[in-house]
Each structure stands twice: as C-alpha cells, then as structure tokens.
Image: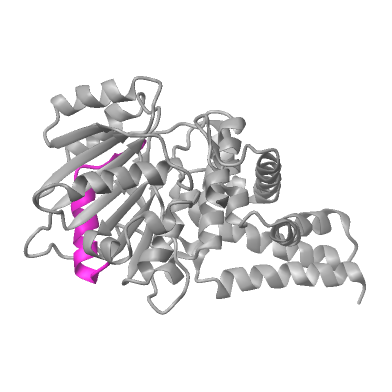
Amino acid sequence: MTLIVVVAVLALAAWIYLLLFRGGFWLARQRDDADPPEAPRSWPSVTAIIPARNESEMLPASLGSLSAQRYPGGFSIVLVDDQSSDGTLDVARKIAKGAARDVAVIEGRPPPGGWTGKVWAMHQGFRYVGTSKKTPDYLLFTDADIVYAPTALRDLVARAKAHELVLTSVMAKLNCESLAERALIPAFVFFFQMLYPFAWVNRSSANTAAAAGGCMLVETAALKRAGGLAPIRAALIDDCALAALLKKEGPIWLGLSESVRSARPYPALSDIRRMVTRSAYAQLDYSPFMLAVTIACMALAFLTPPLLALGAAYPANLVGAAAWALMAVAYLPILRLYRVSPLWALALPSIAAAYVAFTLDSAYQHWRGRGGLWKGRSQALAAKR
C-alpha cells in the first residue's frame, strides 16, 4: 500500500470517526425547541448582566428585547458599561428610562491586572447584584448584541428548573446574510460543535464542558459555591471556562437556538477573521505544538480528501472522494439550520482552509503582542498572567 493510499484511508477513517463516534455533533439535534419542558410551579427571580463595550448601535435591539421579556417571575437587568467611547453609557441610560423592567446602568472601572475585560465587567455586575436586598435565583450573562424572542427567558428558566441545571446556555443564531457570512458563519458553528459535542457537554458523566457566552443562565447559588468569577478572571474564552467551572457544581446544558439571535453583522471576510483570531490561539492554550497538531489534523480531514479526489490515481482518488462525500453530508444539517444553500457543503474544504489561516493569524497576532484584540483592547496578556 503506497503512502498516498495510506493518507487517503486515514482521511476516510477520520470522517467515519467524526460521524459515528463524536457525539453526533453534526446532526445539530441539541436545540432549545426540542422536548420543551413543562413550566415550573413557581417562577424564580432572574437578573440579566450585560457587559457592554462600544455597543451603542446594538443596545436598542438587545436591551429592548430583554426589557420586553414576557417572564412571569421577577426579572431585572444590570448593564455594565465597559469603558466605552461611543456613547454606550448614554444610550443605555436612555433606554433604561423607558424600559418596562428595572434596568440599572453602571459605569465599569478599568480591569485590574490579571483580569480580561469582559470577565471583569461581568464580575462588576455580579458584585452589584450581590448588594441588593434579595439575591436573584438565577443570573443571565448575556452579550450586548444578543436579541431575545419574547418568551426566550421563560423557556430558558423552564429548562433549567426542569433538569436542575446550574448552567443553561444556548448558542445564539448568528447573522447570516452577507456573502462572507453565508460562506463562513455556519462553519463557525460546525467547528464549535465538532470541538465541543453538545451531547457530551449535556452528559453529566462526560468531562466535556462548554457554553456560548452570548446567553448563559447561571444558578446564583452554584456560582457562589464555585467562588464567583474570580477563578476564571484571566480567561479569554470565558464561556467555556465558566462551563468547566460550573460543571463541577452540577449538570449543564448547551444547545442551538433560533429564539436567541445575534444582531451583530459580519459584512466582510475581515470582520469574521477578527472574530476568530481574537481567541483561536487561546483555544490552543498558546501552544506552538498544539497549533502544529491542529493544522495537521485540519489538513488531513478537510484538505486532503478533495486534493486526492481530484488529483490522485486509483484507488486513492476514490477513497478521497468518499471522505469528501462524508464531509459534505456532515455539513448539511447546520447549513439547513442557517437556511443556506446545500451547495456550500462542497466548499467546506476551502472554508476550512480559511479557518486554518485565521488560526495562524491568531498565533501571529499573539506573538507580536496583539493577541485577544477586541475593540481596541488586547487581552491575551492578561490571560497569560
């Protein structure tokens, strides 16, 4: 058996493993509208905490949707302005005055050494909530670009109560309208599911822990038992760090959603590149070795099959084509969720190549001291302290 045939067989074996033995991640079955739980007998109190940095354009939709929640229990909102320079504070205060719910807007302080900006803002909101006369039963950590359907919070809480979850998180449906978004956004969700199979996340006996930072409903008592947010103060990927922290306290759940969505547009390729490069190298724990392994695995699984199918001789070309076909089949469910043409499945190798380039760029930005750059703040240095 020649080396090229061996490589083809390894690529095919990789896709057989991914489809059959990786928690069925590609089926996208873990959804917040699947098996809806019954309403609890009494509705617990909830406070939403929104860290907001230069989000003046997003707040009318996001904060407005939260204040309009049809939630039967007590619900309040705390927005922490994270050193914004675009008038976020003024916009938030204006919205708060006309809101149907109690909305507190506080001015955040600069992050101290060892804290990443977002986690510090979340901590300030958590600390503010702790000064109230009655601590809420749950905290909803949510991003300033996330828009909620009117009953989304009710559904989140019902699931949390029904299954006694300490963390209930949904991956907000990302904007997918521009050409760049249609090409790359479904793949972002696909790769996240491949890295953290949701079925494994939701299994108490599994070690896999992950969350989607845009929408995380946390049991307050569990967060206090875990030591609050200080244990993850340096985390650049704060959502997965919080999930790992809280899974030690009880069951967690992560799913896809269409009732929770992001209003943030990514009109150009460069916008998506910045989103990915901010944390891709942090995901590899800033390890050159893990970077090399990741690139090798991505090349084997995603790039080798079409190259062999189109350029190799028999039988490597047929084995490569079979691997490419399995790859395309695996990509179809997430394309269907995002209502994108199934023809994009054939382009997944090229899309994966773009994500490899983004990951390399993330490492390069870290090496030049600009890792974790988000809205003018480089946070990777804090994450490494």
**Residue 183 falls within the magenta-colored stretch:** no
Q: Which residue is painted at 44% across and 66% down in the image?
A: 209
Quadrant housing residue 68: top left
Q: Which residue in the rendered view is the most extreme toward the bottom?
A: 205
The answer to which of 223 and 359 lies nearer the viewer is 223
Q: Residue at x 14, y 25 (%)?
A: 97
Residue 70, percent from left and from top: 13, 44
**At 49% across and 53% down in the image, what residue appears?**
334
Q: Relative to 229, is 381 on the left or the right?
A: right
Q: Nearer the viewer, residue 349 or 189?
A: 189
Q: Residue furthest front?
A: 113
Along the viewing direction, whichever of 67 and 13 lies nearer the viewer: 67
Residue at image position (70%, 51%) is 349
Q: Quadrant of the N terminus?
A: bottom right
Percent coordinates x, y for residue 294 in the rendering: 69, 59
Residue 108 appearing in the image: yes
Above or below: residue 161 compared with residue 295:
below
| Residue 378 vs residue 346, the one in the foreground | 378
User: Against 359, is 82 above or below?
Assistant: above
Res 142 seen here: no
Q: Is residue 244 left or right of residue 162?
A: right
User: Measured along the vertical axis of the image, is residue 217 above or below residue 80?
Assistant: below
The magenta span reads 145-165
Q: Is residue 148 magenta?
A: yes
Q: Is residue 300 left or right of residue 22?
A: right
